[in-house]
Image (spheres, grey):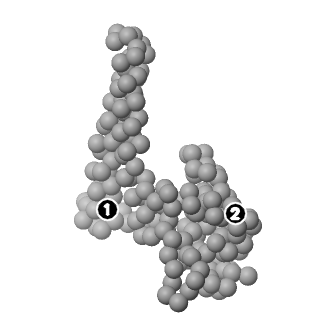
Amino acid sequence: MMRHMAVADDQQLSDPAVRSFIERFALVLAAAGMQRMAARAFAALLVSEDGSLTAREFAELLQVSPAAVSGSVRYLENARMVRRARRPGERTDHWTLGGESWYEAVGTRTDIIDALAAALDDGLAAVPDAGQAAERMAEMRDFFSFLGAEMPRVIARWRASRSGTANGADNGRR
């Protein structure tokens, strides 16, 4: 039994609808390129009431081995989607979402976008200037350059909308 979680959280996480959401959301994240087990772990944290789980809780909830949990949380930590923490007086690690970590992880990864644009620049040097390949590659490079430049502004606008400082902010559910 998950001793560290609140009873209400334990009951919520055992709900078939919640478990179904975890699996559906994980499939969407996996289709977007995330490792499947890491996606399941992220979804489990998302639905946990306090946004925090121990390795044991992950393993019990997701019905997986501790090794699968270890690899998944390491992946999520490296992607800056979760943080490892210890509560005062405990020797057990907890992984938490942190308030803004998920969108910060997505929105600040312009290094990948910049690397794609740079690689496309290199590719453009390798193909004839007037060919269709150069045209496709230039458009793709321009898109990634645009996206890299816009991403910090998108994150700033998101923060403003969440704090209620943007016009037309919708802080509720859809």
Q: Give the labeled residue for mark 1.
A: 159
Q: Are marks 2 and 1 in contact (CB under 8 Å)?
A: no
Residue 108: percent from the left, percent from the top? 37, 52
In front here: 172 or 146? 146
Of circles 2 and 1, the one toward us is: 2
Amino acid type, mark 2 = Ala
Q: Is residue 46 left or right of residue 171?
A: right
Amino acid type, mark 1 = Arg
Q: Circle 1: is it few (<14), some (14-19), or many (20+) Cα within 10 Å?
A: some
At 33% from the left edge and 47% from the top edge, which residue is drawn?
151
Count of number-bearing discs = 2
Q: Is residue 101 left or right of residue 18?
A: left
Residue 73: percent from the left, percent from the top? 58, 63
In front here: 112 or 18? 112
Q: Give the labeled residue for mark 2.
A: 67
Image vertical order of residue 106 relative to residue 131, above or below: below
At 36% from the left edge and 39% from the top edge, which residue is drawn?
114
